[in-house]
Every structure is written in C-alpha cells, then in structure tokens.
C-alpha cells in the first residue's frame, strides 16, 4: 500500500534552488533514510512534507487511512504540562483517567487510587496503561508528575519520543532521532524500530542506526532524489558506482565538447549558417561536461602546535553537585601525547562535568589538575556556536583572526572560508540564515583555526552530515595531538578512539582499553562467567583460606598498552579454543580421508596448540 506520493516538488531559497522536480513514493513497511550534505534541504523537505512549509511547485499526497507522526530534531513544548499529560497527547476519557491514576500513585493517595481503579476497569484502560509504563520505563522516564519545563534537552527529547511511540502512528517521520539520547536508549530505540512494522522516513547521521534500521536510502544530491533499495552499507557501494558512471559520462561529454568548442569558435558568419539545434545542443553539452561528480571534501589537513611530553595530569579530582550527589570521584589520569580517548555514559552521568574540569571551566571540589606549558586547547562545546546571530559568516572568522595558517600556508579569512566550502556568496550571509549543520561546521572552524594540540570535542557529530563526518574522522585519525571526545555516535567513537572512559554513575569512572563496541561485547562477558563460576566452582573450606599479604592484595597496575593486550587476549583465546576443538573433532571422527587435508589439519592443530600455550602464559603474566 502506498503511504506517500511526491510529484514534481520544487523549492527555492532565495536564488538557491534546493531541489527541483522531486518525484518519489514511500510504501507500507519501508524504512527510509534521507541522506544529503548539510544545507542541501533535508530538514526543509521534511517540513514541506508535514505542511509546515510551502513548496514552490509540486504535489504531496498521503494515504487517507494512515496516521502520521513526527519527531522534531529539537522538540518544542507549549504550556506547563506534566510529563504524563504530554505523553498522553489529545485528551480523552481513557487518557484522562490514566493521567489521574498515575498522579495518584506518585502522590501515594490510596483513596484516590481505589476510586480510579473502578474507572480504569470500566474503560478497559489497563492494557493501554501498561504499554505507557513499558515505553516510559524503557526511555528512563519515571517522574510522571514532573513539569516539562524543568527537564533538560535530552529528557525532553525522550518525552517527545515516548509521546510519539505511545500514539502508535502508521508512518513516522524522524529528524535526527538519536541526537541527545544516551547510548543505552539509542540501542533500545534501534531494536524497537527494527522489530516494529511501522513505516519510517528519517534523517540521521548515526550510521550504525541507519544501517541496522533502514531498508531504503534516499540520497538528495544535485537537486534530485536517488533511491537505493538496501541499507547504508549497500548504499555506499551503489553510490560509488553511480558516481563513477556519472564521471565517465562527464568525461565523454568533455571529449565531445572539444569538437563542439572548435565549431562554436569559428567566425560568426560561419556559425550563423548552422542549424539552431546544434547551437542549443552545445550549451546542453557544456552544462553536462561542467557537472562535477567527484566529492568536494573538506580538507582538514591542519598542523598543530608543538606538544611537549606533559599534556594534562589529573590527580584524584572529585566533583559533587547539590541534589545530584558525587558525579566524579577520585579520578586520576595522565593524558599522553597523541592518544585519543572517548568518554561514554548515560545522560547526566558526568561526561561534560569531567570535560569542564579538565579544561578549567569547572574547579574540582578536591584534587588538582596540572596542564603542560605547551598545551594549546581547542574546546568544541556541546552548546554550539556562541556568536551574534546577526553577524555574517566572514565576520565570525575575521573576529578571531584576519590571517590564518594551515600548515605552512597563510591565507586571509575569505580564502579560509572558501577552503572550507563556504563560497563567496555565503560570506556575507548572516549566521541566523545558516542550516544547523552549516552552523556546526562554522563553529568547528572557529576551534580549529586556533591551531590546537589538545582537542576536546563534546558531541561534535550532532547536525553534521555523513560526508562531513567522514572527513572529520579522517582528520582526527591523523591528528598528531591529543584528542578527548564525548559522543553518542557509536560509529564515530569506534573509528577514532584508542580507549574509553566509562562513567558508570555514583562518581565511578572505568578506563576500558578498547572502543565502544568492544566495551559492549566485553561488558556482557563477566556476568556470564561469574554465574558459570558460581555453578561449577567447588565449595572451599573457609579454614583452608589464608589471607593474602598486602602485596598480594594490590595487583600491579597495568599500563595502557598492557590493558589493550589483555583485552585482546581475552577476545582471541576463546576463538582459538573453538577452532582447536573443531579440528580435534574432525581428526577423531574419521570422516576426513584426503591425505593433504589431514596433513593440513594436523599442522594447524599443532600451531594452534603452541599459540594457545603462549597466549595463556602471557594472560597469566598480565593477571599477576
């Protein structure tokens, strides 16, 4: 069944044509992601589809029998509603009694609860109430009577998401649904949408989310929609094929153009005698040949200021807040030159607090921080660009530096902006006119232009398009200074960092020698192993247990490299054991008759046995 049809949709922003004669449709069960560069019209297209903006021309038709829901990138709530009032949406007898019932439970009003139970029974509201509680619980929303106005941006995003899912629309439009959500909730939402039969159209930069949830990709490029029937991985492959095909077509057009150029350059009197259609064809050919399909990458090859051996040393720093308790407790770490560290944890766990202490924006309650004399920090704050919205793009950069150096190359502010794909016609555009992603890119320039050697990035991926993210990732991978990143973008964290600080709550910070995906896989192992040990380990006689001396009780602190080596061993050893058992089974089964195969299996078995002995020995050395 067709849910949405779009025909000949065109929209101009001033003199800029964002898209022209778009034609596409979305059918029941499709989970579609819209992918495009910042500033090309993704959010504008969503708003036109929802009737919030008017297209210049075109036709949009929804199926009359479906219910459409929308999650805004930054939800806005009117009035002074409570959480439960907001998530229940349009008032009805059922939603009103559920709101009263939940409020009575929060107050502990047993008399009211008793009276409302009968009304809940009469309206058959229990299944609906249970669904509400389940979704709110999964999204970690527990205080139903709390005013919406008192919530943080991330909490408001979760309330808006809960309201959307509880209303059970047939077709959901999502604008950056993972922004401001913590990793645990992103995992839950990813699983929920994957299992659900709901039809989706979404804009997201979260590539893991996009790859696992979506089955169709719409790419908005050169004012047109290109459709790919597959997930993000499939899209990357087919998109490259499309670009290569377009490049070949453009090259062919350029060869033809040379001949046509010779002809058009002849004397005017000679040209006048030729057919008009050939003149028209020349200009069409010129337009095709000029089309540049190669990626216009943002080249981020910055040099950085020299960084000495001492970067930032934190000694037992602690920070607590009234009403929240201890957020960071006795945290110590010496940052090394060139290392790249990620910080992960739930919203409100203390990630930004740790960053702010390390950068001097917050003073620890106890402990102290020493910063090296050669450190030049570059702090990209989650709050985004903090400039006068009436200033132009050129004024923002010129206020920081008139002359800028990229490596050994000097340039003025206009040249620097062109270098970062802000063309001349955008230099005098006011900041308020930029798209969200363009503002983020401009803000990134204000950080990098200072030539930092210690980059601190707090949610740098929000609102950036995927192609820009790829370039930023390449820059960070090759960056010679120290990098500290807070991000909910799992792909981004996995690609960049050497290890992560996991903020577990109650002030505890764990240093894990791997990326986010490795942490998730590793964190699921201890509980299983512990449970298995409890079931299989023989009970010991307490009289035979001798207390260890102090040296035995304090295990040697592993270096960063040793921590990584230990984690790798614990990952590789089970794989090797499994392969060894598999070979052993084949050799003992008598089913392998080929002499060459038998020889190869025997050789592999001996090599695996020797390798496992070495791995186990090294594992024991690191454990002691």
Image (spheres, rainbow, N blue to C red):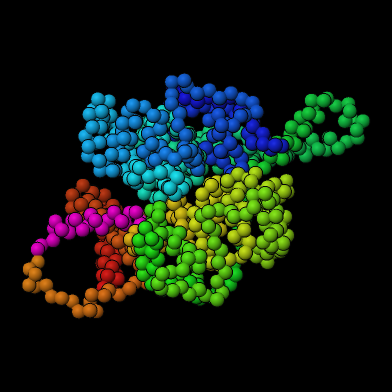
- Res 504 seen here: no
- Picture layout, residue 374 above or below residue 61: below
Q: Residue furthest front?
A: 111
Quadrant of the image containing the N terminus: top left
- Picture layout, residue 177 above or below residue 55: below
- Picture layout, residue 606 above or below residue 251: below
Looking at the magenta stretch, what is its main secondary structure?
A: helix
The residue located at (26%, 49%) in the rendering is 594
Quadrant of the image containing the C terminus: bottom left
Q: Nearer the viewer, residue 287 or 23?
A: 23
Expressed as whole percent of the image width and height from the top left, the position of residue 443 reads: 60, 54
Asked if residue 317 lies left or right of residue 113, the reply is right
- Res 323 seen here: yes
- Please state the extent of the stretch shown in magenta in the rendering: 518-539
Expressed as whole percent of the image width and height from the top left, the position of residue 614 reads: 28, 68
The residue located at (58%, 47%) in the rendering is 437
Q: Residue furthest right?
A: 269
Q: Nearer the viewer, residue 362 or 456?
A: 362
Expressed as whole percent of the image width and height from the top left, the position of residue 291 reads: 68, 40
Q: Nearer the viewer, residue 568 or 13?
A: 13
Magenta stretch: residue 570 in it? no
Q: Nearer the viewer, residue 571 or 188?
A: 188
The residue located at (58%, 36%) in the rendering is 44
The image quarter in which residue 138 lies: top left
The residue located at (26%, 75%) in the rendering is 554
């Amino acid at each position: 069944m067709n849910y949405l049809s779009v025909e000949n949709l065109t929209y101009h922003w001033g003199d800029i044509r964002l898209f022209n004669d778009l034609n596409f449709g979305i059918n029941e069960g499709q989970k579609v992601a819209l992918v495009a560069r910042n500033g090309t019209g993704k959010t504008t297209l969503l708003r036109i589809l929802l009737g919030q903006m008017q297209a210049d021309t075109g036709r949009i038709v929804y199926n009359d029998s479906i219910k459409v829901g929308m999650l805004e990138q930054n939800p806005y709530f009117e009035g002074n509603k409570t959480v439960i009032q907001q998530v229940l949406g349009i008032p009805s007898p059922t939603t009103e009694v559920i709101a009263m019932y939940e409020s009575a439970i929060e107050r502990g009003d047993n008399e009211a609860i008793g009276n409302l139970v009968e009304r809940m029974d009469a309206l058959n509201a229990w299944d609906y109430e249970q669904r509400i509680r389940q979704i709110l619980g999964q999204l970690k929303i527990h205080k139903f009577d709390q005013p919406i106005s008192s919530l943080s941006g991330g909490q408001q995003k979760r309330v808006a998401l809960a309201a959307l899912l509880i209303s059970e629309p047939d077709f959901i439009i999502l604008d950056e649904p993972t922004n401001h959500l913590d990793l645990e909730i992103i995992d839950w939402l990813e699983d929920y949408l994957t299992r659900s039969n709901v039809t989706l159209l979404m804009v997201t930069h979260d590539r893991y989310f996009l790859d696992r949830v979506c089955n169709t990709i719409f790419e908005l490029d050169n004012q047109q929609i290109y459709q790919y029937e597959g997930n993000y991985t499939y899209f990357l492959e087919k998109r490259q094929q499309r670009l290569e095909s377009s490049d070949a077509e453009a090259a062919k057009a350029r060869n033809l153009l040379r001949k046509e150029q010779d002809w058009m350059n002849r004397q005017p009197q000679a040209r006048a005698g030729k057919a008009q259609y050939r003149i028209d064809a020349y200009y069409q050919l010129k337009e095709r040949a000029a089309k540049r399909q190669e990626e216009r990458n943002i080249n981020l090859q910055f040099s950085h200021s020299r960084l000495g051996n001492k970067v930032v040393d934190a000694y037992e720093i602690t920070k607590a807040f009234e009403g929240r308790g201890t957020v960071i407790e006795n945290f110590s770490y010496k940052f090394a030159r060139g290392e790249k560290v990620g910080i992960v944890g739930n919203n409100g766990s203390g990630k930004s607090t740790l960053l702010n202490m390390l950068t001097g924006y917050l003073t620890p309650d106890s402990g102290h921080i020493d910063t090296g004399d050669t450190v030049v920090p570059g702090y990209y704050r989650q709050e985004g660009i903090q400039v006068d919205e009436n200033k132009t793009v050129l004024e923002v950069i010129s206020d920081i530096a008139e002359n800028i150096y990229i490596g050994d190359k000097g340039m003025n502010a206009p040249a620097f902006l062109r270098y970062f794909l802000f063309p001349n016609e955008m230099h005098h555009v006011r900041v308020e006119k930029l798209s969200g992603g363009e503002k983020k890119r401009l803000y990134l320039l204000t950080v990098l232009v200072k030539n930092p050697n210690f980059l601190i990035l707090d949610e740098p991926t929000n609102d950036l398009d995927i192609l820009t993210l790829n370039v930023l990732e390449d820059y960070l991978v090759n960056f010679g200074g120290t990098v500290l990143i807070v991000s909910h973008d799992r792909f981004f964290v996995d690609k960049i960092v050497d290890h992560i600080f996991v903020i577990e709550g109650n002030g505890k910070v764990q240093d894990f020698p791997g990326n986010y995906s490795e942490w998730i896989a590793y964190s699921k192992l201890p509980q299983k192993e512990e449970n298995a040990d409890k079931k299989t380990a023989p009970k010991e006689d307490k009289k035979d247990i001798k207390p260890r001396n102090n040296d035995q009780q304090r295990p040697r602190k592993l270096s960063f490299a040793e921590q990584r080596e230990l984690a790798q061993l614990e990952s590789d050893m089970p794989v090797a054991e499994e392969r060894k058992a598999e070979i052993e089974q084949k050799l003992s089964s008598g089913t392998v008759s080929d002499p060459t195969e038998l020889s190869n299996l025997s050789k592999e078995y001996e090599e695996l046995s020797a390798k496992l002995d070495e791995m186990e020995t090294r594992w024991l050395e690191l454990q002691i």
